[in-house]
Each structure stands twice: as structure tokens, then as C-alpha cells.
Amino acid sequence: MRHFSGVWAFCLAILSALPADAEPIRGAGSTFAAPVISAWGRAYKDARADGGDYFTLDWTVDYEPVGSLAGVMRLSHPDMDFAATDAPLSPEEVARRNVAQFPIVMGGIAVVANVAGVEAGKLRLDGPTLADIFSGQVKSWSDPAIATLNPDIQLPDRVIKVLRRQDGSGSTFVFTSYLSKTSSQWREKFGAATLINWVVGQGAEGTGSLVALAGTTADSITYLEYGQVARAGLPAVQLRNETGAFVAPTAESLAAGLSSVGWNASRHFFADTTNMPGPAAYPMAAVTYAVVPKDRGMERTKRVLDLFRLAYSAGASDARALGYIPVSPELADQVDRYWSQTLTNLNN
């Protein structure tokens, strides 16, 4: 009995040392980055458990893929620890909201065209033609605007079925930023935003729904996160970049464009990653940012930073496996210095 009473005393001592109000790290936002954030959450739990079977809620991550806009809006809830957004906040908005903002993973937006009779990966488009399709001006796959870009393809005389996000989406922001840069008509009428007043097409809520719709809708066109497209085996379009070259979305072509970004910590890493220079650059790169409130207390903030430290180091392989581009070690060092200036000196 003495042995068992000693064991129980030891267990009670451990339990009493644990926080009574253990809570997961709570985040919400980007559906673009949801797969890799989920992988990082599992890795964080495993790292904290250190090979053991025991864990507490403090070692878990509860992430809701509700879209970039909804994620940032949820930061007003006091139980939220971070938002993930593919549409970065401006430096002025970061200051107004009393938050910190930094990149956590990179990738791109692919245009998917599911056209029967057209070989996957062969279709070519440019920004102005895409803008005309998504504004309803180009309605048929055989339209001269598309045919001119694809002289070697027999295009069908069938209606283009436009598919797009209907919720507030960072993917929409990246896509419409590219259209705004390449089409003055689009820029003046619609602009770049997470929510657009679409005049054409069928909407879908979230990336998963749009992936499923794109795969089953013949003669459709849409925009999706590159990793999701690669994993689903959907046919991606070659896009004309700033130099006039037609480039397919790949990890290499996305990295080629992102390599030209000059990251500025004083602007909370705000950057435009569309229509990047270079003959090998795919023109629609994307970056997911974490937005972390400064009023959640130091202990909660430290856990969030621990999660993203793991993401920058051990989590880089998870990012690559899922079709993303991890934050470089050099940029991670820059972010770490930014944390020390903006977050780690906060009061509880």
C-alpha cells in the first residue's frame, strides 16, 4: 500500500502543477494555409509530449479555416491567439489594431481550367484575358482572346463556367491583385479585395468546396492554392508573367518570384507578391501571415511564438511536402528579431 500511495502522491503532485485552465492555442483564418497549420499543430503536440502519451490542451492547436477576412475579424474575441491571413494588413492597420504581423509560409494561386479535350497544363492565359473572363466579357472557350494565346490548341465552342470564392478569402485578394495589376478595367471596376462584388459565376465557401467543384464541373475555370491543386491533380494554366513568358505554377517558379521580395520588418513585412519580375517567375505568389494581438498576455503570446519557431525549423519539411514554400532561415531570423522588438517585451 505504501508503494501505491507514493505513486498516487507523485501523480497528484504533477497534476497540481499543471494549469487548471489549460487551453489550446486558438487560431483562425486562411483556408490556403490550413493544411500546413494542421500539420504544425500535430508536430507541436508531439514535440511538447516528447515521445510520451500524456498531453494537455496547452500543447494543442485549435485552428478554424474560416477564410482570411473572418480570421482577422475574430481577433476581436479575447479567446483568439492569432489569425492567419493571405491578405496582409497595411502598416497603418497593424498599428490601429495593436497587433504584430509576420509571414509564416508561402505558396501561390494557380488558375485551374477543366476543359474537356484540352491537355492538362497546355492552356495559356494572361491577366487581361482572365480579367475579361471573370468580369463576364469573355464567355466562350473559343473566344478570339483565348484563341490568340493558344494557336496550337483546338478550343471548344462551349460556355466558360466561372467558379470563385463567395466568402472573404486571401486567395481572392491575391488573384484580384494580379488582375488589378494587369488590367486597368478590372482595377477601376472591381479592384483587389478579399470580397468582390462578382457579376458572373458560381460561388463556393472555402477552398475545399471550390476544389471539389472545380474537379467535377466541366468547362470551368477558377483560382486555387497551388498545393491544393497539385494534391488534387487539377489542370493548371500557364500564365504570362511580366517579361511575357508563359509559366506554369511550380515550387520553383513560385520561389523565383518570391526571391525578389524585399522584406521590411518596419512595415510588418507587408509586401505585394503578384506579377513579380523575372523570366522564370510565376506571377501569382502568395504569403500567409500570422497576426498576433499584443493584449493577450505574455504566456499566451510565448506559446504562439513557440508554435511558429517550430514551423520555421522542423515544420519546413511539412510545408514542402504539402506544396508550400517554407520561410527561409534568413527571413526567420529577421522575424525573430521583429518578435523581440514588438512582442516579447509585453506585459502580462
Image (cartoon, rainbow, N blue to C red):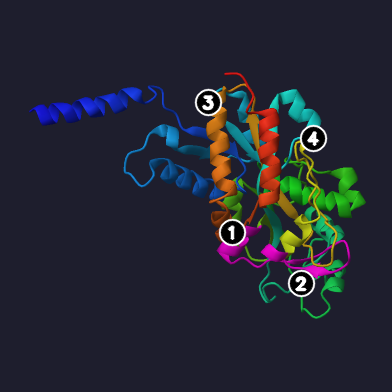
Question: Is residue 242 shown above or below 167?
Answer: below
- Asked if disc 4 and disc 2 are in contact, CB closer than 8 Å, the reply is no
Viewer-nearest of labels 1 and 3?
Answer: 3
Does label 4 or label 2 sit earlier along the sequence?
2
For label 3, the residue is 299
Q: CA distance from mark 3 to mark 2?
A: 61 Å
Q: Which mark is residue 266?
A: 4
The answer, for residue 86, to whether it is visible in the render is no
Viewer-nearest of labels 1 and 4?
Answer: 4
For label 1, the residue is 320
Image side of residue 19 versus residue 94, left or right? left
Q: Amino acid at mark 3?
A: Glu
Does label 4 or label 3 sit earlier along the sequence?
4
Question: Is residue 328 shown above or below 45?
Answer: below
Residue for point 70% across, 55% down: 108
Q: Which residues are magenta?
A: 226-252
Q: CA distance from mark 1 to mark 3?
A: 30 Å
